[in-house]
Image (cartoon, rainbow, N blue to C red):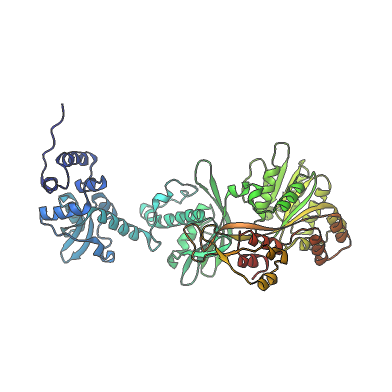
Amino acid sequence: MASEPIPLSGLARRLVEESLIEADVASRATDDARKQGQPYVSYLVRNNLASARAIAVSAAQEFGVPLMDLNAFDLDSVPKDLVSDKLIRQHNALPLVRRGVRLFVAVSDPTNIQALDEIKFQTGITTEPILVEEDKLAIIIEQFLNASEDDGLGGLDSDELEDLDLENMEKVEEEDEATAADETPIVRFVNKMLLDAIKSGASDIHFEPYEKSYRVRFRTDGILHEVSKPPQNLSTRLAARLKVMSEMDISERRMPQDGRIKMKLSKTRAIDFRVNTLPTLWGEKVVLRILDPSSAKMGIEMLGFEEDQRKLFMDALVRPQGMVLVTGPTGSGKTVSLYTGLNILNTQERNIATAEDPVEINLEGINQVNVNHKVGLDFSSALRSFLRQDPDIVMVGEIRDIETAEIAIKAAQTGHMVLSTLHTNSAAETLTRLRNMGVPAFNLATSVSLIIAQRLARRLCTVCKKQLDVPKDLLLAEGFTEEDIKGGLELYEPNTEGCDKCSGGYKGRVGIYEVVKITDELARIIMEEGNSIELSDQARVHGFNDLRRSGLEKVMQGLTSLAEANRVTTGH
């Protein structure tokens, strides 16, 4: 037997009379709203049963309550700390203006007498309703509550964070409810910065305090840019939050500290942050390096090697012994190149060990060791220990001294594949640098099999890049050959305004490489203690492109701009 329809009264009846809603819909909505504990007007608007504007106009006429357009209202004039946030959310009612002994409260449903009574009880002030549209009221309440919570940190979308699981984020000290509530905006702001950095593809996040300001910068595609300017007085609290997340000593502010944060984006993907604090004149600067394990598992074809360069790299990796050196400045992608090689070599038949300072990305199946100078575990001592553990492949994070170099070379000469890095600018300079360290020329010539010098250039956006016309004489001056120009050369530049797919006309980065195999002729020059110019000239005779030529190849392929190739290969 069908239930009797609920008799309509007040606002529901008027809406039916004005043909804004059907009688059976109005009756059912009244029943459903009561069962769900929702205000009638909120239920109608949220379920698209009637427009918020039409309901507001009808309600104003039915109850004789003044109607106001919230679009014309200044949110800054809302009295703060007068009514609790909990009460505002619970009743969907916002105090707008106080006039003497009267408080005017914005409501979308004038029959919500309970809201007015509870606000009056809490404030001790007589309340009077002002009718507003439901949808606009919901927006202005959110704006008001976010502004009061953020302490100048800016509005945050908590929905963006709900799927994340940040390990260590809840490891906070015992604190009372008031303190915990006060820190919530800091927690949300830091979480949002981490999330935004991942979304934008940033490699580093800088939290920087100064005398009269504070800024947060992201390094995206190798370039730092400012993303936020929180109030300077939050410097200490932001640093403390990051130190708690990284499991550092919060009380220690005079010495640099290192830590890590792990962020789980899903069941199958996690991102680590390597965190370092540095005491500066105006507080602790905190820098986070974003370590994405997926970057270490890129196929070699994704790195940007030309076909002949890729073949040289692969041939060197599959040799039973020898040394592969990857060189370049900090941030040039050396670690990704080495990890890509290690992933190719990582099979059940091989014993692989790495010594790193520190271990950046965890690789399953590889024995990774963190260098710890405090206890005497440096690269040379780790390498000695590796050689007692029956290794097939050894990776040394960096060759910094003669002791490490000598052990690595001895390993390469006695049946092991050794991979390592140096901070030099070219392949030829790598050999002279090792020789200047004190490594005998004979050992270099017989152990080093391949040297890769590399840089990372910003990749042009494929959507908005623009063709660039350059006169022939300028092209020749830049290093292009007559052969390059003869076939018609198409160069591109970034659209500095960018598009929705990029930032400033660039999206992502591409590797520029100099890959030099140590041939018999190069080995002879090394044995004769030839200088870096002689080594470079001989490498060109063999057809090994230097960094400049490799950069121009990327420009001709339309992958990057001439200006960007100049920036990373010539420094201007």
> Is residue 394 left or right of 554 when viewed as pictured?
right
Quadrant location of the N terminus? top left
Which of these two is toward me, 182 or 65?
65
Residue 180 is situated, as x and y percent measured from the top left of the image, at: 39, 53
Q: Is residue 428 above or below residue 262?
A: below
Quadrant location of the C terminus? bottom right
Outermost residue toward the top?
Answer: 1
Q: Is residue 48 visible?
A: yes
> Is residue 497 left or right of 53 when viewed as pictured?
right
Q: Is residue 516 above or below residue 319?
A: below
Numbered marks: total: 0
Q: Is residue 192 above or below residue 489?
A: above
Q: Is residue 254 visible?
A: no
> Is residue 452 left or right of 364 when viewed as pictured?
right
Which of these two is toward me, 22 or 274?
22
Examine the image and state in which quarter residue 549 appears. bottom right
> Is residue 114 left or right of 226 when viewed as pictured?
left
Which of these two is toward me, 453 or 370?
453
Residue 209 is situated, as x and y percent measured from the top left of the image, at: 50, 67
Residue 515 is situated, as x and y percent measured from the top left of the image, at: 74, 56
Outermost residue toward the front?
Answer: 487
Residue 214 is situated, as x and y percent measured from the top left of the image, at: 47, 67
